[in-house]
Image (cartoon, rainbow, N blue to C red):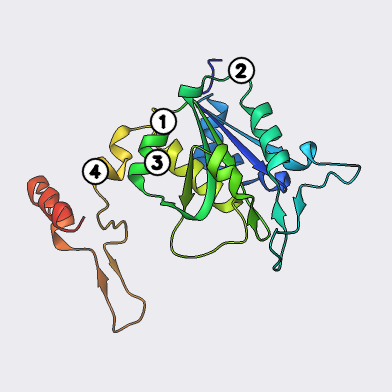
Amino acid sequence: MNSPKINFHIITIFPELFGAGSYSDHSLLKRAKEAGKISVQAHDLRLWGEGIHRKVDGIPYGGGPGMVLGIEPIYKAVKAVTKGTAKKDTRIILFSTRGKQFSGAEAERLAQYKNIVFICGRYEGVDERVAEHIADEEISMGDFVLMGGELPAMTVIEAVSRFVPEVLGKIESLESIKGSYKAYTRPEIFKPTKTKEWKVPEVLVSGHHKEIEKWRTENA
């Protein structure tokens, strides 16, 4: 089997979220993994923690509530995960509310890398030196706050994987090519009650391909 087109690495304190039977073990992502198009590996940050309890966090300087994930275990984890990879082929991403908002264009850009490493924060956050000296970029999923970076990691994995050749089967399946237009299927007329009818737009059942294409363009 050829080497995967993209190796996704997730550094997290909850690696079980990405274990057997998890999200990436289903549907198109599963097929992409089996075909050797992508690989998804979770790395337990606590493996690089301190002491018998594998401590990875500490109280924030200056006071305040919560705990902060420390720079030392994250530095060691990233160094181990990226060992033997070329810098130009690798992107290290820290999820942060202060990061650049994720988009389809960002997903397409990231699909050019062979190795993508996600640093998933938890608790009160991550030592800022990780953003300053370790991560190549910070990404935000939007104007809201989640409890950690694990869901963003899986979101980015799926969005980026769609740009890997053959993962979707047909390149025409990309919304950036076909557009994201309204879709319908059988039955042509659905009756939720005796007095209601929900119909498929007539143009879609007309057989006039130019008119259908025009309709889809207008409704994309």
Residue shown at 57%/53% (left/top)? 151
Ranked by sequence position, the earlier of labels 4 and 1 is 1
Instruction: Quadrant for residue 11, please give it.
Output: top right
Is 207 drawn above or below residue 192 in the view shown?
A: above
Is 75 placed above or below 181 here? Answer: above
Determine the secondary structure under disc 1.
loop
Would you name the residue on which mark 3 appears? 107
* Number of the front mark, 3 or 1: 3
Element on which disc 3 rests? helix
Identify the amino acid type marked 4: Lys
Q: CA distance from mark 2 to mark 3?
A: 24 Å
Q: Label 1 belongs to which residue?
A: 164
Q: Residue furthest bottom?
A: 195
* Comes first in the chain, label 2 or label 4: 2
204 with respect to 132 (left or right)? left
| Quadrant of the snapshot with the N terminus | top right
Q: Which residue is mark 4?
A: 178
Query: Going 13% across and 48% down the picture, which residue do you hit?
Result: 213
- Where residue 171 appears, as percent x and y from the top left, is 31, 33
